[in-house]
Image (tube, rainbow, N blue to C red):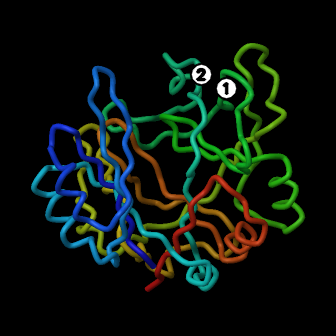
Amino acid sequence: MQIAHKLTFSHRDEVDSVLKAFTINTKQSILPGGGYLIHIDVAEDDIEWPRLRMLAREKNAVDVYTTIFTAAEIEAAEWVRLSPAYEQGYPQPEDGWEEATYAHACPECGAGYQQIAPFRLRREPRLGRHDFMSLYWAYTLFATPAVFAMLAEAGITGYEQWPALLRSSAEPSQLVMQVLCTAAAHPALVDADDLEPVVCPQCGVTRYRTHKRGMMRLRSEALRRDVDMQLTHEWFGSGGYSFRELLVSQRLARLVLQHGWRGVRLQPVLLV
């Protein structure tokens, strides 16, 4: 297990000369008007992390971090969080896709939605070598026909296969279909207060900050054992964006690793 950070400084932070003293690689992205951003990928076990952390705090740098687990840690877990890691395109129509796709979503926080219609895509997605994808703005999962064939062959349960419709023709995509999870766990989150719970004043749903550090802890008795996929009872997110985590069984996680499927991130949970 490793905590990995992506730090981003602005050229206005005037850190170029300071970073020259660090034994770490940096990347630049040019901005319109001649400015630029400086990006650094660093893990907390890196010898330079303590100094970089202080510099990032001093300059108020953007710090995006997550936990990266080894294949052995993933394979050993009874349940694993599976999250999209490759986004491609926007749900259609961009103005009004939520009303066309979801029902019962809270207008304040977005929680509580139920999908009532297939997603529409602007065009066939560019997958490259990815086997899974998601859409910007929507926490959803799509997979290739080859993946669905393997899921069926392995007897994976807890999901439905929904078409993804092309906006121009309303015909189903030939490259991807949606993995729609149909099962949900009971309330299971341990250490909930650490994830800064906030109750929506309109719908009353409690939402939590996304879990990023280490293993998410869940109550074992709250999870279903008759399916290979299930959503958390709890909602996560901020602003008007809400989602539930997708949990997958050990045998499904091992299937992802075995076939080297790309486009998703696997993070084991700790059952207590």
Q: Which residue is mark 1?
A: 121
Asked where in the image residue 223 lies, by quadrant, the reply is bottom right
* Mark 1: few/some/many CA within 10 Å (<14, 14-19, 20+): many
Please give the name of the residue rendered at 41% of the width and 72% of the height, measured from the top-left corner.
Answer: 216
Residue 154, position in %: x, y? 85, 68
Determine whether 222 is above or below 207 in the image. below
Residue 231, position in %: x, y? 55, 59
Query: Looking at the picture, which amino acid does disc 2 mark?
Result: Gln
Please give the name of the residue rendered at 33% of the width and 28% of the height, measured from the top-left corner.
Answer: 31
Q: Nearer the viewer, residue 146 or 208?
A: 146
Which one is earlier in the sequence, the residue at label 2 or at label 1? 2
Q: Quadrant of the N terminus?
A: bottom left
Task: Tell me if residue 211 can be seen.
Answer: no
**What number is the disc on residue 94?**
none
Give the secondary structure at mark 1: strand
Q: Nearer the viewer, residue 81 or 116?
A: 81
Please give the name of the residue rendered at 74% of the width and 49% of the height, measured from the top-left corner.
Answer: 160
Position of 121 with respect to 169 (left or right) is left
Residue 122, position in %: x, y? 66, 21
Task: Tell me if residue 255 can be seen.
Answer: yes
Give the secondary structure at mark 2: loop
Determine whether 176 is above or below 182 in the image. above
